[in-house]
Amino acid sequence: MFDDTWARFRALEQTSGRTGNAIEDWRRGRDRYAVWALRVIDPVVTARMAAVAERLGDSLVRVRSEDAHVTAWVCGFPAAVPTLDDDVADAILDAQRAAVSRLRPLRLAVGAPNAFATCAFLEVHDPHGDLAALRAALAVSGAKEVRFARYQPHVTVGRFGDSRPAAPMARALAALRAGDHFAPCAVRDSRVELIELDAREPDRLTTVWSRGYDFDGWSSPRSRTKRSVSP
């Protein structure tokens, strides 16, 4: 899966930055966008993010290290009664909260740097099938994920701020991938969160429900946690 992604990026001519009207065309007057994410709290992962960001320099709009996360499921725009194709019913989100509350703690591994046309990321591996189990639990009756490509779990290091030649970035990432410092490492601490994005300013998100895990086990679920994170 990730080998194919890497091959596509190496063959890419230009990265894809955000275009002028993309946000307005996407949100269609709506303000809230919901995503399930696994927030990653691990100094090894944040050090890897920093190393990749330093290599890519000003090409990236960086994700803050404290906001490292893996998107698990893209819900859509919350609505009491969905009307557009990427709306999600509030009742679906409630059912997903209940489903996540019954899950065992998640075990993931984070590995090498890679890139899509729109962003640089760290590959995420699911050796125990826990992320697959989370996604299966989120597929409650009536749920439809908003997805435009095959799901590939990753930790975003930063999005590309503009369109520019991809070859220099591919060379920088290749140098990191060739070393032995990016072997998959187990994530020590994580938190499953339902986050809402302010669709008018897509780099601003707020946690609305959270359940954490470290090696001592799950904490109790928390609702309406006011914590801003980056995508």
Image (cartoon, rainbow, N blue to C red):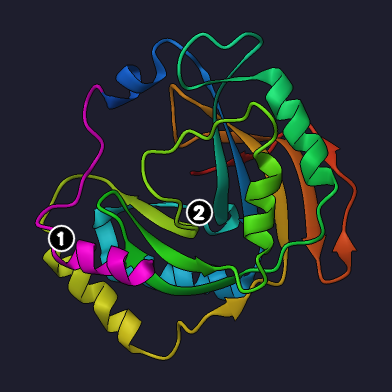
Q: Residues within 10 Å of mark 2 (few under 14, many from 20)?
A: some
**Of the pair 79 and 41, the residue shown nearer to us:** 79
115 vs 48: above or below: above
The quadrant of the image that shows the N terminus is bottom left
Q: Residues within 10 Å of mark 1 (few under 14, many from 20)?
A: some
What is the quadrant of residue 36 in the picture?
Answer: top right
54 vs 180: above or below: above
Residue 219 highlighted magenta (yes or no): no
Give the percent coordinates (x, y) of residue 91.
73, 20
Give the percent coordinates (x, y) of residue 115.
31, 61
Give the percent coordinates (x, y) of residue 128.
67, 71
The residue to which callout 2 is attached is: 64
* Circles 1, 2 touching at the beta carbon (< 8 Å): no
Q: Amino acid at mark 1?
A: Ala
* Lateral position of residue 168 relative to residue 160, left or right: left
Image point (57%, 42%), residue name? 73
Image point (44%, 27%), residue name? 201
Give the percent coordinates (x, y) of residue 177.
33, 81
Q: Amino acid at mark 2?
A: Arg
Image point (82%, 71%), residue name? 215
* Lateral position of residue 69 relative to residue 60, left or right: right
The residue to which callout 1 is attached is: 166
User: In the image, which residues are magenta?
Assistant: 1-21
Q: Residue furthest front?
A: 141
What's the distance in space between the residues labelled 1 and 2, CA to CA?
23 Å
Dot 1 or dot 2: first in sequence order is 2
* Lateral position of residue 229 relative to residue 52, left or right: right
Q: Which mark is residue 174?
A: none
Q: Is residue 106 visible?
A: yes
Judged by depth in the image, the label closer to the viewer, 1 or 2, is 1
**Count of marks overlaid on the render:** 2
- Label 2 element class: loop
